[in-house]
Image (tube, helix red, strand yellow):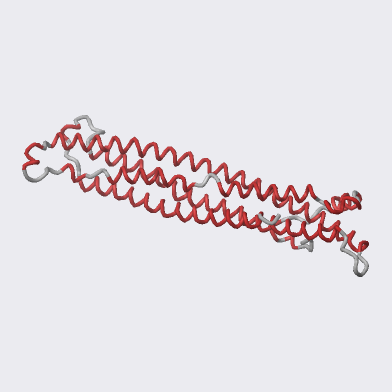
Amino acid sequence: MADGAYRWQGHAPAPDAARIEAIDAAWDEAGAPAFAEPARAAAVERIDAALTAARTGDLGEAAAGLAHARSMLEGLEPGALEPRRGLAGLFDSRKRRLKACRDAFRRADAALSETAADLTARIDAAARRSAALDGVWTETRDAMVELDAHLLAADRRLPAHQPVEGAPAHPLEGRKAALEACRAAALGALPLIRAAQNADARAAEAIRPCGDGVAAWRQDWTDALGLAGKRPKKVRPDRERLLRSRDALLARIERTLTELNASGLRRAEVAGRLADLRAPL
């Protein structure tokens, strides 16, 4: 489609007139069946790059770490600080209960700290992937402009190759159709590349608050369990504070997991549509 629509579709500039003249001047009749093959191959390569990026580096992989963090948090039960009823309570000292709760907190804190570090690394990787996709988007648009230049040059040549009645069409006719199909696929890939970036961005924004949530939870539990004071044995933990802090982080993790699931579905849709564009080329 070299009809001027490139002026607005994909924000692609019009082909350079000098480039069209150069293509026309280099016309080789014998090469008509493979006309513009380098330009076509470059566009296909860019679509392949977009498809690869859409299929890899999914922030949904962070869901496994968050699910593990959720499991660790759920295992922290401030109610265990209360004396047990019946005979079991006779042998269950406050000191022992406090020690057990602190040990469980330390284990959970180590796991959540590891998860938070992993999430930070994934967010950074998503930012790098988005920057790389910016490059793929630009290269795809430029490949489309190069195809436009070849299509306009082909339009110049075709009037001189009108077949007589009953004769097969000139090879340039079929070649032009193949180039137009490739150009349409490149155009269709442009918004899908942006969609892959947007899916990553939304997932990253959902993940980011989890790091702050872990830090707030750690501070609350450290204070409430007396691990920040000089006389930790004298502390009497605030069970309600511990519950509020734990449940607030659990709720944040649940919201993030929901968004990661939605992001994964969006990325899968983008990859599927890019694969559909690529398949017939």
Residue 134 against residue 270 in the figure, above or below: above
Give coordinates of residue 81: x percent, y percent: 17, 42
Count of numbered circles in the view: 0
In front of the other: 256 or 221:
256
List the single residue furthest toward the top.
230
- Is 228 rendered above or below residue 204? above
Question: Which residue: 28% across, 42% down?
Answer: 220
Write the residue at 83% across / 58% down.
152
User: Residue at coordinates 78% horizontally, 51% vertically from top-left?
Assistant: 146
Estimate the x, y position of residue 161 in percent, counting from the top left.
92, 62
Residue 174, x across and y down, in percent = 81, 60
Q: Name the image quarter holding residue 176.
A: bottom right
> Where, quadrant-wise, is the N terminus in this rendering?
bottom right
Q: Residue at x 34, y 35 (%)?
A: 110
The image position of residue 120, as x and y in percent, is 46, 40
Residue toward you, 185 or 240:
185
